[in-house]
Amino acid sequence: MSEEKKHIVTYEELKNLEDELSDLKVNRRKEIAQKIKEAREQGDLSENAEYDAAKDEQRDIETRIAELEKILKNVEVIDEDSLDTESVYIGCKVHFVDMESKEEFTYKISSSTGANILKGKISNESPIGSKLIGSKVGQVITVDAPNGRHSYKILDFKREKDKK
């Protein structure tokens, strides 16, 4: 059997994952059990939309719990304080410019488990995220993306803690 993939996270990402798991196990399971109980009390389950919806939600919660437990079982926490302060790494917010279009971007480099492009977080495993890791201010990186090759210049970066 192949070895499970390590999930590289910051201490803060680890805490967020643990908090989410705890909330799902302690709070959400109880909430959904109550919804299922109330739906059962309505009678005929074969035509009970509330019951079906509650069971679907229960399945989604249990799937997410299993996913989080698998991630946490194979987590590797990086010590941000021991990393090179001159290079980009997970947890940094990076400001860079597309060398061709001159469009500027700012993204936080996150683990694959914490990535959310809508919240400005890109994965360290994404084409651009993997190229940003280890880069320095002023450096130009070239990224092969599905829509072609792009060059970006690193303008600045800083370590930024996640905000809830």
Image (tube, helix red, strand yellow):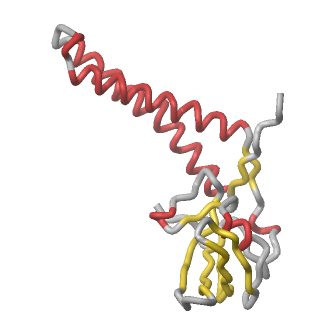
Residue under the image location 34 percent in, 29 percent down = 31
Vertical position of residue 58 compared to residue 90: above or below: above
Question: In the depicted view, which residue is nearer to us: 61 or 29?
Answer: 61
Image position of 84 with respect to 24: above or below? below
Image check: 101 left or right of 92? left
Residue 27 lies left or right of residue 135; in this view the side is left
Q: Residue at x 51, y 68 (%)?
A: 120
Q: Nearer the viewer, residue 143 or 34?
A: 143
Give percent across and percent down for residue 45: 23, 11
Farthest residue to the front: give it.
148
Q: Residue at x 44, y 31 (%)?
A: 60
Q: Position of residue 133 (x, y in %)?
A: 75, 70
For image coordinates 83% across by 33% down, the residue present is 2
Asked if residue 51 lies left or right of residue 101, the reply is left
Question: Which percent across, then down, holds residue 51?
Answer: 26, 20
Q: Residue furthest left?
A: 42
Which residue occupies the foreground of this view, 52 or 71? Answer: 52
Up the image or down, 54 lies above or below 6; here it is above
Location of residue 156 by image quarter: bottom right
Find residue 43 and report its horizontal and vertical position in percent: 17, 8
Residue 64 in the figure: left or right of residue 95: left
